[in-house]
Amino acid sequence: MRALFPWIVSLSLTLLVGSLIYFSVPDWGQSWRVMLQGRPVFLLAGLGLTLLHMGLRAWRWGVLLSPVKHPLAYQSLFSLTVAKYVINLIPPRAGEVVASVVLARKERIPAASVIATSLLERILDVVTVVGIFAVYLVLFSGQHPPNSERGQEIMLAIQRFSLIGVPILALALVALVYLAGRWDWTGRIPGRLSRIVVSFGDGFRALRKGGERVEVAVLSLAIWITISLQLWILARAYLSDFPLTGALLLTVITVVGVAIPTPGGVGGFQFFMQLALTHFFAPFLSTQDPNSQAAGISNGCYMVSMVPLLLLGYVLLHREGLSWSRISRIASRKPAESVS
């Protein structure tokens, strides 16, 4: 029953989000027609930015792991970065853990250190996204105010999370980096557990070195600028005058949708992008049926972003020798078994 729990949660959320999307679209025929009308040049450019995004993530992962082992094969880093998205199709979305364990075995480094860098990547992503949102609020929010009461509620909810969540994440990050550099306290921990804790701390060592710290910060910013440009280009495939500054808000809102633990972020991305388009960018949509148009655009953006990536990830998954049964075994292990 415990093994089925992630599947039940994931499928329930998928059905919930799917039903919300379905009943919010007045005309699905029109939505599909909009989706197929995207301009090919912009769609291809969006796909190219998706691959650049993957390349930057692989680069950053290698920098974070450089204190543990240097150099690491960039080919393996890129392959497993893309493969994570395929693995995340399977509940409980254990792509980070599985890819970390596989990389650790290939490179003969502690799995705990690699898993720690994956955790650090997620923290860096959240901090960077909130930073982008802060820039948007200060410089550009007046250009695209909410055009509905619900839009105001969405903006207020994001602001509240930023004010509460970011200080907590920042303190946690500082504490982890501080503890990673002080090993005296680990002497009170039993032997095997102490080795795991020290190995886990090694995953944060890159932030204690000036050069690596700057490189990680620049790469984190480059990753999210690339994602914002990708969303802008894909939106322009359907809305020729969609503003570049609007893509910053699209990025922040769609991140919330992707965080919903559905397989591959399906449903969550489309639902939140549709919300953003209809409640913040209505002037750029058709006045006759903006909801159907927004649904078509969000589905088109998801398909271009994810389908080629999943196909590439599936190929790279097999090149790394990962079968679905092996992925399931790694994902179902207890945490202590994965990091040892």
Image (cartoon, rainbow, N blue to C red):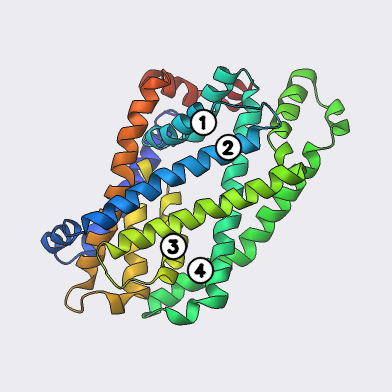
Residue type, mark 4 in image:
Ala
Which residue is denoted by mark 1 in the rendering? Answer: 77
Disc nearer the start of the sequence (2/3): 2
In front of the other: label 3 or label 4?
A: 3
111 left or right of 88? right
Q: Give yes or no for contact between labels 1 and 3 (Cβ–Cβ under 8 Å).
A: no
185 left or right of 135? right
Residue type, mark 3 in image:
Ile
Mark 4: secondary structure: helix
Disc nearer the start of the sequence (1/3): 1
- Residue in view at x 51 percent, y 51 percent: 223
Mark 1: secondary structure: helix
For the C terminus, which image quadrant? top right
Q: Give yes or no for contact between labels 1 and 2 (Cβ–Cβ under 8 Å).
A: yes
Which residue is denoted by mark 4 in the rendering? Answer: 157
State how far apart marks 1 and 3 are (Cα): 28 Å
Residue type, mark 2 in image:
Trp
